[in-house]
Image (cartoon, rainbow, N blue to C red):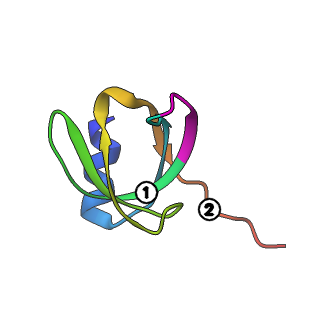
Amino acid sequence: MNGLIQRSIDTKEKIVIFYIDYENNVTARYIRVINYNDDKILAYCYYRRQVRTFKRNNILSVGPARKQMEA
C-alpha cells in the first residue's frame, strides 16, 4: 500500500481506494495523494472535488486507477 501511495505523490497519479466512510458504507474513491503519515492520508478526492483526509484504518484496499479505453 505504501508504494502506491508514495508513487501517487511522486507522479501526481490518480489511485483508487476502497474506504469505509463515517456511516460504515464501503465507497470507492479516486484520489491523488498529497501527503500521508501512519494514521491518515491527505488527498484530493475526485468524487468530492476537494482535499480530504482519509483514516488509514478505514482503507480496505488501494489500487491504480484504470485508464479509460477509447473506442
Residue sitting at 19 percent across and 34 percent down?
A: 39
29 is higher (above) or lower (below) than 46 = above
44 is higher (above) or lower (below) than 35 = below
Residue sitting at 49 percent across and 62 percent down?
A: 48
Image x and y of residue 71, in percent? 84, 73
Image x and y of residue 5, in percent? 30, 47
Q: Secondary structure at mark 1?
A: strand
Where is the N terminus found, in terms of image quarters? top left
Query: From mark 1 to mark 2, how far is it between C-alphas?
Result: 14 Å
> What is the three-letter code of the residue carrying label 2?
Lys
**Residue with the mark numbered 2:** 67
Residue sitting at 74 percent across and 65 percent down?
A: 69
**Residue with the mark numbered 1:** 31
Image x and y of residue 68, in percent? 69, 64
29 in magenta: no
Q: Residue furthest front?
A: 23
Range of magenta residues: 23-28
26 is higher (above) or lower (below) than 36 = above
Q: Residue furthest bottom?
A: 71
Q: Nearer the viewer, residue 70 or 58?
A: 58
Q: Secondary structure at mark 2?
A: loop
Q: Nearer the viewer, residue 32 or 2?
A: 32
Residue sitting at 51 percent across and 28 percent down?
A: 24
> What is the three-letter code of the residue carrying label 1?
Ile
